[in-house]
Amino acid sequence: MKEATPSTDTIADNAIRINLTDATGKAIKSVDYTKTGATKGTTLATDGKTLADTDTSAINTLITNALAGTANASAFTSLSDTQKATLAAAKFGSAVTLQLGATKSVGNDQTTVSQVWNATVYDSLSGSKSARAAGKIATMIPFFNSNVNFTNAMNKFNADPDVKGSKNDVISKATLQAAFKKDGLDTVYLKITPTILPRIGGGFLDNIDPTGLYMKANLDYDALPTTIHYGDKIQLSYQYEGGALYHKAFNQTIFPNITQNADGYYELPINDDILNAILDAIVRYGI
C-alpha cells in the first residue's frame, strides 16, 4: 500500500487544506475545507483564536467522512481544543497539519515560559540574527508597561493543561504551536509609551488603559530548542515588526481608512527613517 502524502495541488483562495498525520507524523490524507465568500489570507476564525461551532461541526464531519473505511478511522472522533486553536488561526489559501491519534501525555509536569524574553535582531551586513534578553530590562523602567501583554499570555500558558504531561515525553511541535497561539504568545503587542494611569502591581490598570503606542512582536519559532519536554521552562525569542506602531482605542477617528486588525489594534505606518531608526534602537538596546 502506498503511503499517503500531503496534497501539493493548488489551494483555492476560499479553502484551507488540512493535512492529517498519524501520531508519528506520517501523512494520512489531505482534505480541503471551503467557505463561500472567504478571502485568501484571512483566518478561519474572525479573531484568529476561537473556532466557531458551525466550523467545528463541519470540519468534524469532513474529517470523519474522509477517514471512513480506512485503517485510521478510529484515530479521530472530534477536534480537540488544540486542533481547534490550530484551525482558528489557519488562513484561507494555505495549509495546516493536524496530528491524529496522538496519545495524551499523562503527568503533572507543567511546561512554562520564562518571564525574560529575547529580542531577535538582524545584522543587515552579515544577514545573521542574534538574540538579546529584553523582558527584565522592560520591567525595570517603572513608567513603561510593555511587558503586560506578554505577562498575561505567559500566565495563561503556564497554567495550560495542553502543555502539562510527563517530563519523559517530548511535546510535539503542533501541540506547542497551538498552545502558543491559543494563549496569546504567538503575537504580542508591547507598549513603548508611558501609561496615563498610575501603575500598580499586577498590571491591573495597564490592562484597562487603552491609550499608548505598541510595537508588534512575533514569536521566532526558529529560536526554540529542537526538543522540548513537558515540564521544561522555555525562554522565547521575538522578532519585532518594523515600519509601524499600533494603538488600541475604543474609537479611532484621527487616522482615516485604518481599521482594526484581527488582534483589535490599529496599525499606524511609520514612513520616517529617523523614527524607524529610533524604534530599531529600542529593540536592540532595551525599552
Image (cartoon, rainbow, N blue to C red):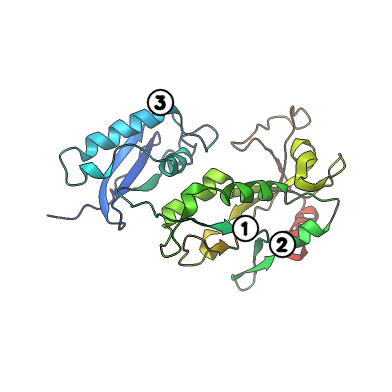
Which corner quadrant of the image does residue 114 belong to?
bottom right
Give the secondary structure at mark 1: strand
Q: Residues within 10 Å of mark 3 (few under 14, many from 20)?
A: few
State which tag comes first along the sequence, 2 or 3.
Answer: 3
Q: Which residue is more in the foreground, 164 or 2?
A: 164
Residue at 75% x, 54% y is: 276
**Any part of residue 227 in sight:** yes
Give the secondary structure at mark 3: helix
Query: Which residue is at the far left?
Result: 1
Residue marked by disc 2 = 134
**Any part of residue 287 in sight:** no
State which tag comes first along the sequence, 2 or 1.
Answer: 2
Identity of the amino acid at label 2? Ala
Identity of the amino acid at label 3? Thr
Identity of the amino acid at label 1? Tyr
State which tag comes first along the sequence, 1 or 3.
Answer: 3
Q: Which residue is more in the foreground, 157 or 220?
A: 157
Query: Which residue is at the far bottom?
Result: 126
Query: Which residue is at the far front?
Result: 108
Residue 206 horizontal/vertical position (percent): 78, 42
Is 119 above or below relative to 271? below
Give the secondary structure at mark 2: loop
Q: Residues within 10 Å of mark 2 (few under 14, many from 20)?
A: many
* Inter-mark Cα distance, 1 to 3: 34 Å
Marks 2 and 1 in Cβ contact (< 8 Å): yes
Residue marked by disc 3 = 54
| Side of 213 relative to 166 (left or right) | right
Residue 179 horizontal/vertical position (percent): 50, 48
Residue at 83% x, 45% y is: 200
Residue marked by disc 1 = 238
Q: The N terminus lies in which quarter of the figure?
A: bottom left
Q: The C terminus lies in which quarter of the figure?
A: bottom right
